Amino acid sequence: MRQSSITQSLRGCFITGTDTGVGKTVVTAALAVALRKRGYAVGVMKPIETGVPPFADERSDAARLRAASRSSDAITEVRPYAFRRPLAPLDAARLEKKTVTLPAIMRAFRTLQSRHEVVLVEGVGGVYVPITSSLNVSDLIYRMRLPAIVIGRASLGGINHALLTLEALRQRNIFVLALVLNRTLPAQTATAREQERSTVRLLRQLADVPVIGPLPYRSMREGRFHGEVARLTRTAAITTLTRLVLTSWRGTRSRRG
């Protein structure tokens, strides 16, 4: 295992989003590949996953992240909670007569931390998605004491969602490493391209955090995930994000006290 001042401080980051379906999994996987190729032992975690297909767990987000990181961690550590219904965790758990508990998630997280130089944790939905009757995703980020990376849409509507998410994280005193803008749909018309340029430009002015992207649009048809991740890993945007992760964590700790 590499020994350096950066490595000894580096513990990971939490990848959250402005919404569901904004590209958290593909960005987390690309970041895991990029860090692994730099020689780091990377752990991944998806504490709660909903909409997990029965008898097809290899297509789940958690399985894809584990494959990207090439970790040998048990899937129950990578993902302590899996529910079949594609709902917010609170309701998905209720329908299966189960309860998500923070101690179980934190035990798995600390186990992964003990094995890896860096742990990338992917959230579920956005920061206010309820995981229990009294806790949401932002509470989980806060308890893990990780800096956040926010994934947002580069299209129309992305400004409001991104700024609301950043403000919610600031209210919890959670340091944000970067806002990554993703093309979730191809900008096929002149109007869509103008809207995208406006979204990116205004967020760079207003976000008060590094704004990366927009990432290229990728087709996520079945069977193409890891190929798209490999291509994304080679982009300048993921290279920049990787550098931020490697160089900013110590500063994050000092800012958060």
Image (cartoon, helix red, strand yellow):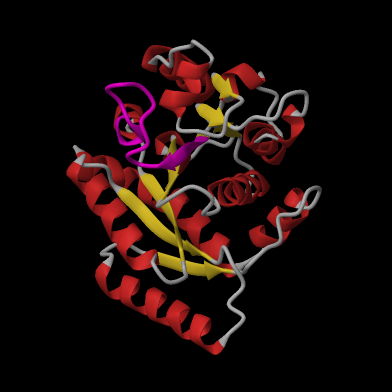
Expressed as whole percent of the image width and height from the top left, the position of residue 198 reads 39, 81
Write down the quadrant of residue 50 in the picture: top right
Question: Residue at image x 45%, y 50%?
Answer: 245
Expressed as whole percent of the image width and height from the top left, the position of residue 206 reads 25, 70
Classify 9 as above or below 26: above
Q: Nearer the viewer, residue 79 or 249?
A: 79
Q: Which residues are magenta?
A: 119-139
Write down the quadrant of residue 137 in the picture: top left
Q: Nearer the viewer, residue 141 or 39?
A: 141
Question: Residue at image x 57%, y 23%?
Answer: 83
- Image quarter where the N terminus lies is top right
- Image quarter where the C terminus lies is top left
Classify 21 as above or below 197: above
Q: Is residue 120 magenta?
A: yes
Expressed as whole percent of the image width and height from the top left, the position of residue 46 reads 54, 31
Question: Residue at image x 49%, y 10%?
Answer: 97
For this view, does 114 lie left or right of residue 161?
right
Q: Nearer the viewer, residue 241 or 200?
A: 200
Q: How many marks?
A: 0
Classify 163 as above or below 205: above
Question: Residue at image x 40%, y 74%?
Answer: 200
For this view, does 129 lie left or right of residue 167?
right
Q: Residue extending furthest front?
A: 95
Q: Residue extending furthest right?
A: 223
Q: Is residue 38 magenta?
A: no
Write down the quadrant of residue 68 in the picture: top right
